[in-house]
Structures are given as structure tokens and as C-alpha cells.
Amino acid sequence: MQERLEAANQARLLVQQCHTAVFSTLSVKLQGHPFGSVSPAMLTDSGNMVFYVSDIAQHARNLQQDPRLSLTLFQQAEQGDQNEQGRVTLSGKASPLSDEQSAGYAERYFRLFPDALRYRQAHDFRFWQLEVTDVRYIGGFGKIFWLTQEEWQRPLPQWSVAQESSMVEHMNADHADACQLIVADHLGLHGQPVMASVYPDGCHYRLNQKSVFVPWNQPCYSAQEVRQALVAMTNKARAA
């Protein structure tokens, strides 16, 4: 049981670290033949996936006819055997989100993927959500799991979308030095990062036109727990 819980945690961390997914849909043009494409995708707090796509994109057209979708995210091997790297495939059914539902994800999505803001002027772009029902995680040799929806999903945090935005804005406006220390200490990256998200399992920063993820030592489900985690990480980084 503990092994499966750890696998679920590692799979979720991998999804947080990898921001581009391979989309596998069933092609209308090719009469049901599998069709692959690539696009950014964002994890929700509960464990579903959100993506922003044009109605004329091939995978969007496929999903309008058959909602079955698999997303594959993987760690790119810098050298050696790619098969030794972690990868995860999330499967389920996708559906477009209403304007009201989209508003709950848009701020975080555009902080993580600011280049996508230019697509807002195109009227055919909209948010979709993949409701994840099955997870296939391979963490390397001998670490292979089919994870259930119950093992994959997490409790929702106590903060609202507006409160997350407030935490992000506060860190960037008043604690830019702490953001810099945390990213340097945890990831060895230098520069001035900008916080982009707050999740129960960690937070994203934007640095050098990329999003990077720093996990908490333990899950945080309240704003107070996030504050305590950031203070502890900042103090550790200063001491180092």
C-alpha cells in the first residue's frame, strides 16, 4: 500500500514538472486511427488536466466526436536510455469547459503559460478538461503501476482562486528575494524567478521563460500551511 502511495506521489510530481503533453486521440479523418499531437497541459488541484486549444486543432476536432483522451508526460533524457526515465499516461474523457468553469483555471494557466495569452484574442480557443480515471506510471526499471482514480486524486485545498492569486502576487511583490533563494536552493537555478502557482503539493516559478516546480516537504491544504512552508524553505536556503 505504501509503495502504491509513493508511486502516486512520484507520478503527480512528474506531471507538475513536465508541462507539455503528448495528446492521443481517435482520428476522425483517419477513421478511428490513433492520432498524436503535442500541447501544454496543466494539472488541477484534484488531479484532472486542463488544456487550452483551438476548435480547429486536429485533436480538438477528434475530441468533439469521441471524448476519449490519453495524455503522456515524460522526463526528457539528457543522455543515455530514454526508457530509464519516468513517464506517466493519464486517461479518461475530455470535455470543453463553460466560461464560468474556465474562469476557475484561467489565471493560473496564463501565469504558467504566459505565451498563451495572445490566443485569447482568437475566438475559437477554449479550455477543456480531462477527467482522469486511469493512470499508468513508470518510474524506471521495475517501477510500473496502474493507479486508480482514488489513488491519484487529492483533497482540494482550502483557499480559493482569488486567494491563490493573492498569495502569488504577495510573494512576487514583497518576497522576491525569498523566491530567488528557494529556487536556487532546491533546483540550483539562478536568476529572478516569479511565482506562478500554489498547489497543495508545491508551487511553480517562472524563470528564463520556463516553469519550474518546487515541492513542499509535506502537503499544504491551508494558506497558513503554505506560509509556514515558504518561511521554512526560505530559512533553510539562507542557512545554506
Image (tube, rainbow, N blue to C red):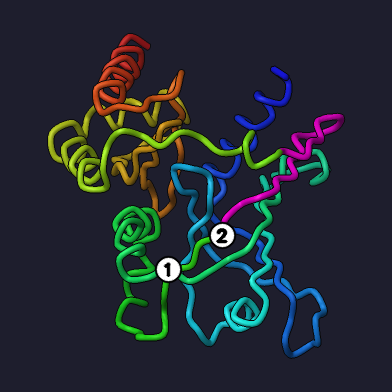
The magenta stretch spans residue 176: no
At horizontal 72% and vertical 86% (from top left) the residue drawn is 28
- Left or right: where does residue 223 sit relative to residue 41? left
Magenta range is: 130-147
Check the image and name the residue furthest to the left. 174
Check the image and name the residue furthest to the top. 239
Residue type, numbered disc 1:
Leu
- Left or right: where does residue 167 sit relative to residue 147? left
| Secondary structure mostly seen in the magenta stretch | strand
From the top left corner, tell me how far across and down residue 182 is, in percent.
35, 26
From the top left corner, tell me how far across and down residue 168 is, in percent.
24, 41
From the top left corner, tell me how far across and down residue 180 is, in percent.
30, 32
At horizontal 20% and vertical 47% (from top left) the residue drawn is 162
Task: Tell me where residue 67 sits by quadrant.
Answer: bottom right
- Left or right: where does residue 210 sit relative to residue 136? left
Relative depth, front residue between 171 and 82: 171
> Which residue is identified by label 2?
130
Mark 1 crowd level (few <14, some 14–19, many ≥20, 10 Å Cα): some
> Which residue is identified by label 1?
97
Residue type, numbered disc 2:
Leu
Task: Tell me where residue 94 sits by quadrant.
Answer: bottom right
Vertical arrangement, residue 233 with respect to residue 142, above or below: above
